Image (spheres, rainbow, N blue to C red):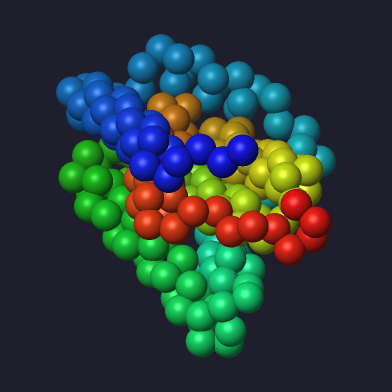
């Protein structure tokens, strides 16, 4: 049984509003201290610095690298192409362009927040990877979460429920791993990561509110 589109859109809108409110509160809390870390930030950061075997650092560097550069943008394009399957070549390209545009817009506004808060990163001497710019919200974290959401949206449209749930778990694990590596490698405070997740969830929930309000989920082509 399918729920009416309007109530689902409303629920997604409420999720977006909640995430936006939590992000706003966190942003105010960070800005109020002029970027100084909280006790939980320092505690987790110091634990990470003390627990860095070479193999774990190498693995973390490999994971964190997927949260920036061309990988996320290629992921957004791939999500659009999958979500647009069955709409013809022009429809797939338009959906891919829309997914890419969504990511670019979210990234652009993230930089506004980033530079407005201007939170310093942890001490450079404790970094285990390259980083640049300010710290809040974490760019790698927000970017990977946004792309994971786009990919989840694509399989929601294209795959069976069982397959979609499996892919959702994989995408979520990837986004979580990227965020956690930023703390482990010493280039972000934990509250930067939380801010990145809340920022991404705000955008994704708002986008879903629009999507399910305009267009219901397509019927599966694989016997569903």
Residue at the image position 56 percent from the left and 41 percent from the top:
2
Q: Along the line of sight, which residue is nearer the eye, 41 or 83?
A: 83
Could you say where residue 207 lies in the image, as x and y percent from the top left? 38, 51
Residue located at (39% from left, 62% from top): 102
In the rendered view, tell whether residue 115 sits above or below residue 102: above
Closest to the observer, 202 or 68: 202
Q: Quadrant of residue 34?
A: top left
- Tell me: residue 121, above or below residue 105: above
- Please report the residue visible at 39 percent of the width from the left and 36 percent of the height from the top: 7
Given residues 184 and 10, the one toward you in this image is: 10
Residue 196 visible to an observer of this rendering = no
Q: Farthest residue toward the bottom?
A: 89
Residue 47 x, y percent position in the rendering:
60, 19
- How many discs appear? 0
Relative to 202, 30 lies left or right: left
Residue 134 in view, yes or no: yes
Picture quarter with the N terminus: top right
Where's residue 108, x and y in %? 30, 60
Q: Residue furthest front?
A: 1
Horizontal relation, residue 82 to residue 19: left or right: right
Q: Residue at x 64, y 57 (%)?
A: 219
Residue sitting nearer the eye, 76 or 35:
76
Where does the image place residue 55, in percent across and percent down from the top left? 81, 41
Asked where in the image residue 35 lies, by quadrant, the reply is top left
């Amino acid at each position: 049984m399918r729920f009416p589109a309007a109530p689902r859109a409303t629920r997604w809108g409420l999720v977006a509003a909640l995430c936006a409110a939590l992000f706003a509160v966190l942003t105010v809390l960070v800005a109020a201290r002029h970027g100084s870390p909280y006790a939980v930030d320092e505690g987790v950061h110091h634990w990470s610095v003390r627990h860095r075997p070479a193999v774990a650092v190498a693995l973390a560097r490999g994971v964190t690298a997927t949260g920036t550069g061309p990988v996320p943008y290629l992921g957004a394009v791939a999500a659009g192409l999958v979500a647009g399957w069955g709409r013809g070549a022009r429809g797939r390209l338009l959906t891919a362009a829309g997914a890419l545009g969504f990511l670019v817009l979210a990234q652009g506004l993230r930089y506004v927040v980033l530079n407005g808060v201007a939170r310093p990163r942890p001490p450079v001497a404790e970094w285990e990877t390259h980083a640049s710019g300010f710290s809040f919200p974490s760019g790698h974290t927000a970017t990977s979460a946004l792309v994971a959401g786009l990919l989840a949206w694509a399989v929601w449209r294209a795959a069976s429920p069982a397959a979609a749930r499996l892919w959702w778990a994989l995408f979520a694990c990837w986004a979580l791993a990227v965020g956690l590596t930023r703390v482990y490698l010493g280039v972000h405070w934990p509250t930067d990561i939380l801010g990145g997740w809340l920022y991404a969830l705000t955008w994704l929930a708002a986008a879903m509110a629009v999507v399910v309000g305009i267009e219901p989920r397509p019927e599966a082509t694989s016997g569903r």
